[in-house]
Image (tube, grey):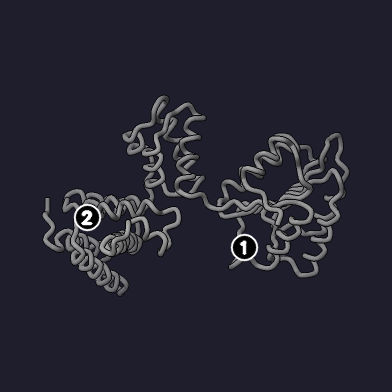
C-alpha cells in the first residue's frame, strides 16, 4: 500500500515532489489540518487563485468535483482540487465507482487532495474508506496521522518552545501533558499561552502551575492526592473548586473511581512482582501512562485493604447517586470524608 509517513510527506512538500492524489486522514486531526495547509500552500501559494484552486466540502456532489479535475491550470504549474471532509459514507455504490474511475484518469498537471480534517470512519474502516485507500496505492498516496505517544508529544512541546526562543525541560514538558492532556491542538494553545506569559528564557514549573489550564482528570487527581495524604483542608478546598467550576458530581465521582482503580491495578501488579508500567500492557492506558506513575505514588501511602475499602465506598456512592432525588454534592462530600478516614488515615 502506498502509505507515506509524516516525515516522508514533510520531505515531499519541502522538495515539491508532488503526487497526483493525496488522501490525508487519521485520529490526530491537528496534523491532518496542518499538513493539508502546508501541502496546498506549497502547490498553490498562500493566496491561491480561483482559476487553479478548487475547494469542495462534505456536501459537494461528485458531479461538481469530477469536472474540476480536468481544468487546465492557468498561469500556474498545477490545477489543485481540494475536497475537505469528503462524504465517502454518503456515496452510493454507483457514485463511488464513478469517482474512483475519475481518480484513475487524473490528468497531468492536476493534483487531487482529499483531507479528512474532522471526519473519521464509523466502526472499523468501512468499505468505502478501504476502496479509497486502495486507489491511493495505484495513483497517489495516503497518509494516516495516528495519535502521538506521550514521549512524542513531549518532544513536540520542547521543539515548539525552542522555536519560540524558550528552553523547556523534559520534566516540565511532562508536567504540561499531565495537566492539559494529550490533545495536540490543546497542548499547542497551552504552550503558546505559557510562552506569552513567561516572556523569555527557561520555562519553570512555577510558570506552568500559574498558567496551564488543568483538565478535569488532573484536577481530580489533585483532589485524590490530598485525600491519600490525609490533608482534609486541601481535599475539601479542591472539591469546592470543582463545584465552583460547575463540574458535574457524577463526572467527578467517575474520575475519583478511575484514580482508585489505577491505584488498585498498580498495587496488584507490584504485589505480583511486576513494575507499575507493565499494567499498561493489559489495560487501555494509551497516551495515559503517566497515570500509573501517579497511582504508584499515591497507592504507596495506603494498604491494599484500604484501597479495596475505598473502592467499596465509591461503588456505594455511585449506586446512591444514580437514585433520584439525592443531593449529589452532599454525597461527594461524605465520600471524601470516608476516603480520608478509611483505614486509619491521619487527618491533618
Q: Quadrant of the N terminus?
A: bottom right
Determine if residue 9 is in view: yes
Dividing the picture into quarters, in which one does residue 191 lie? Answer: top left
Residue 64 sits above or below residue 168 on the image: below
For the point 37% across and 38% down, the residue is: 172
Q: On the picture, is 48 further left or further right than 348?
A: right
For mark 1, what is the residue?
Answer: 121
For the point 29% across and 73% down, the residue is: 319
Residue extending farthest top: 200
Could you say where residue 338 lies in the image, as x and y percent from the top left? Answer: 17, 63
Could you say where residue 94 lies in the image, as x and y percent from the top left? Answer: 80, 69
Q: Secondary structure at mark 1?
A: loop
The one of 301 and 319 positioned closer to us in this rendering: 301
Q: On the picture, is 34 further left or further right than 332?
A: right
Q: On the picture, is 305 further left or further right than 49?
A: left
Q: Secondary structure at mark 2?
A: loop
Could you say where residue 103 lies in the image, as x and y percent from the top left? Answer: 81, 56
Residue 166 sits above or below residue 328 on the image: above
Could you say where residue 269 lies in the image, as x and y percent from the top left? Answer: 30, 62
Residue 14 sits above or below residue 265 on the image: above
Q: Which mark is residue 300?
A: 2
For the point 37% across and 51% down, the residue is: 290
Amino acid at each position: 500500500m502506498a502509505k507515506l509517513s509524516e516525515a516522508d510527506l514533510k520531505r515531499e512538500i519541502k522538495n515539491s515532489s508532488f503526487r497526483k492524489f493525496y488522501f490525508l486522514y487519521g485520529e490526530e486531526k491537528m496534523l491532518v489540518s496542518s499538513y493539508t495547509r502546508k501541502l496546498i500552500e506549497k502547490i498553490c501559494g498562500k493566496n491561491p487563485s480561483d482559476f487553479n484552486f478548487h475547494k469542495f466540502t462534505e456536501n459537494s456532489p461528485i458531479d461538481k468535483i469530477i469536472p474540476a479535475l480536468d481544468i487546465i491550470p492557468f498561469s500556474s504549474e498545477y490545477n489543485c482540487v481540494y475536497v475537505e471532509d469528503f462524504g465517502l459514507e454518503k456515496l452510493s455504490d454507483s457514485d463511488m465507482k464513478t469517482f474512483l474511475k475519475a481518480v484513475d484518469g487524473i490528468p497531468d498537471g492536476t493534483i487531487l487532495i482529499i483531507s479528512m480534517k474532522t471526519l473519521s470512519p464509523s466502526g472499523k474502516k468501512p468499505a468505502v474508506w478501504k476502496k479509497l485507500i486502495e486507489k491511493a496505492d495505484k495513483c497517489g498516496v495516503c497518509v494516516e496521522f495516528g495519535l502521538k505517544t506521550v514521549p512524542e508529544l513531549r518532544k513536540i512541546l520542547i521543539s515548539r518552545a525552542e522555536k519560540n526562543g524558550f528552553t523547556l525541560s523534559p520534566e516540565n514538558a511532562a508536567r504540561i501533558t499531565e495537566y492539559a492532556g494529550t490533545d495536540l491542538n490543546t497542548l499547542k494553545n497551552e504552550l503558546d499561552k505559557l510562552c506569552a506569559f513567561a516572556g523569555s528564557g527557561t520555562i519553570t514549573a512555577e510558570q506552568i502551575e500559574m498558567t496551564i489550564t488543568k483538565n478535569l482528570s488532573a484536577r481530580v487527581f489533585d483532589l485524590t492526592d490530598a485525600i491519600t495524604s490525609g490533608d482534609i483542608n486541601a481535599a475539601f478546598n479542591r472539591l469546592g473548586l470543582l463545584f465552583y467550576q460547575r463540574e458535574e458530581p457524577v463526572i467527578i465521582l467517575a474520575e475519583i473511581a478511575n484514580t482508585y482503580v489505577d491505584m488498585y491495578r498498580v498495587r496488584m501488579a507490584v504485589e505480583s512482582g511486576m513494575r507499575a508500567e507493565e499494567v499498561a500492557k493489559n489495560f487501555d492506558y494509551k497516551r495515559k501512562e503517566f497515570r500509573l506513575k501517579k497511582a504508584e505514588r499515591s497507592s504507596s501511602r495506603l494498604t491494599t485493604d484500604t484501597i479495596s475499602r475505598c473502592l467499596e465506598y465509591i461503588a456505594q456512592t455511585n449506586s446512591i447517586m444514580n437514585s433520584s432525588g439525592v443531593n449529589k454534592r452532599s454525597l461527594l462530600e461524605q465520600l471524601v470524608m470516608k476516603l480520608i478516614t478509611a483505614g486509619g488515615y491521619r487527618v491533618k
